Image: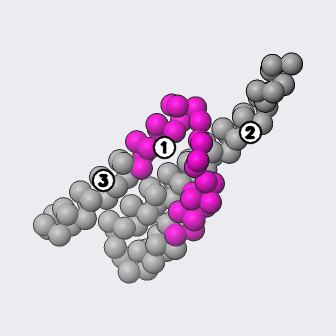
Amino acid sequence: MKGTELIGWSSSFILVLTIAKQIHKQWREGKSENVSKWLFIGQMAASLGFLVYSWLVSNWVFVVTNFAMLLSALIGLCIVIHHRKREQGKPHLNEMES
């Protein structure tokens, strides 16, 4: 493996690890306050475009990275949707006080 590839793979690993950690924290805390579903939708669109581009130019570091980012965005979006649906089922504070 060349030095340039090592830099690419290492950077890819760090990026995917940090995103995975954030998504895990979001799931573990059981809430997605102030997290926009559009963040994940935009990330999926961009990652898909970069994935196709990376495939076409045969850049395997970015093919793998963007595939992992696409999956992380999908998981993040599913978590946000799950949390929002769960929150809709809870009674509001005013209803609980009555």
Position of residue 23 relative to residue 52, above or below, is above
| Image coords of residue 84 (percent x, y) | 70, 41
Q: Which residue is mark 3?
A: 13
> Mark 3 or 1 closer to N-term?
3
Mark 3: which amino acid? Phe
Q: Which residue is located at x 23 percent, y 57 percent?
A: 10
- Say if residue 44 shows up in the picture: no
| Crowding at mark 3 (Cα within 10 Å: few <14, some 14-19, many 20+) | some
Q: Is residue 88 left or right of residue 30?
A: right
Q: Nearer the viewer, residue 4 or 81?
A: 81
Rendered residue at 42%/50% (across/down): 19
Do callouts 3 and 1 mark residues in contact (Cβ within 8 Å)?
no
User: How far apart, in angstroms, are the residues tagged by discs 3 and 1?
Assistant: 15 Å
Q: Disc 2 designates what residue?
A: 85
Q: Quadrant of residue 86?
A: top right
Read off the residue under disc 1. Answer: 23
Q: Main secondary structure of the magenta part?
A: helix
Look at the image and give the residue range highlighted in magenta: 19-46
Q: In the picture, which quadrant includes the N terminus?
A: bottom left
Q: Where is residue 93? Give x, y as percent.
A: 76, 27
Upstream in sequence: badge 2 or badge 1: 1
Residue 17, percent across and down? Answer: 35, 47
Cα gap from disc 3 to disc 2, whole angstroms:
32 Å
